[in-house]
Amino acid sequence: KAGVTQTPRYLIKTRGQQVTLSCSPISGHRSVSWYQQTPGQGLQFLFEYFSETQRNKGNFPGRFSGRQFSNSRSEMNVSTLELGDSALYLCASSLLAGGSPYEQYFGPGTRLTVT
Amino acid sequence: KNEVEQSPQNLTAQEGEFITINCSYSVGISALHWLQQHPGGGIVSLFMLSSGKKKHGRLIATINIQEKHSSLHITASHPRDSAVYICAVTTNYGGSQGNLIFGKGTKLSVKP
């Protein structure tokens, strides 16, 4: 099976712009979670989607949003980019959501640089 | 205080040494995960455990639910084990298992 894929892998944007990142989960996985990793804050949870519904959201401003499509692919969007949004954005997929925890499989990440 | 604490932050070992990385947490959990991150960013899940002990090759993970503590052991360490090891927990509230809370990571360097 193909692993989790994320596009693009690298991205450079300017302050004030918006950006959309994409994540394709492992075939058959219906849950997708997004995480932000920065040198200062480490890894932090952004949001989780299951069957096109957002199930949980981390403590991030409303500029960060996401969605999931019927084929389980997910996108996240950051509007009005700030320098502090420069980070590695990781998505992870798992078989199910809720109930017993399942192992998460991570994508390679998208490295976003905001100038 | 972070909800997930790891120690040590940095660890340098000689090839062949036995390595232990510790993780303590302060929240209720349904599972604890050990992750490995190599330079370049990719994260690999090593273990997910909710009780007892798991072994995979030279890696062993243990968890003590009562003490809210887990350890990751690497036997006969090798330079290819050099990476950042991250402890993360799935909390047992909210019905969501995608909300991982992460430790800051332990950077391991194994010298030949």
Image: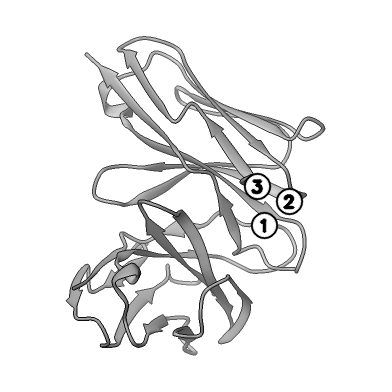
Q: Chain of mark 3?
A: B
Looking at the rendered structure, whether the residues under marks 1 and 2 are on a common chain is answered as: no
Q: Amino acid at mark 3?
A: Glu
Near mark 2 (Cα within 10 A), the count class, few <14, some 14-19 or many ≥20, is some
First-in-chain label (2 vs 3): 3
What type is the residue that disc 2 sits on? Answer: Ser
State the quadrant of the N terminus of chain B: top right
Q: Which mark is residue A101?
A: 1
Assess disc 3: are there few (<14), some (14-19) or many (≥20) residues with their C-alpha within 10 Å of its C-alpha. some
- Label number found at residue B41: none
Tags 1 and 2 touching, CB below 8 Å: yes
Cα–Cα span, label 2 and label 3: 14 Å
Mark 2 or mark 3, whichever is nearer to me = 3
CA–CA distance in space, label 1 to label 2: 7 Å
Residue B11, relative to residue A8: is it above or below?
above
Q: Is residue A112 left or right of A107 when viewed as pictured? A: left
Task: Give the number of marks.
Answer: 3
Say yes or no: labels 3 and 1 on the same chain: no
* Callout 2: SS: strand
Q: Determine the secondary structure under disc 3.
A: loop
Identify the subunit bearing mark 2.
B
| Dot label at residue B3 | 3
Q: CA distance from mark 3 to mark 1?
A: 19 Å
Q: Residue at x 70, y 55 (%)?
A: B91
Give the x, y percent position of residue B43: 38, 50
Residue where numbered disc 2 is placed: B30
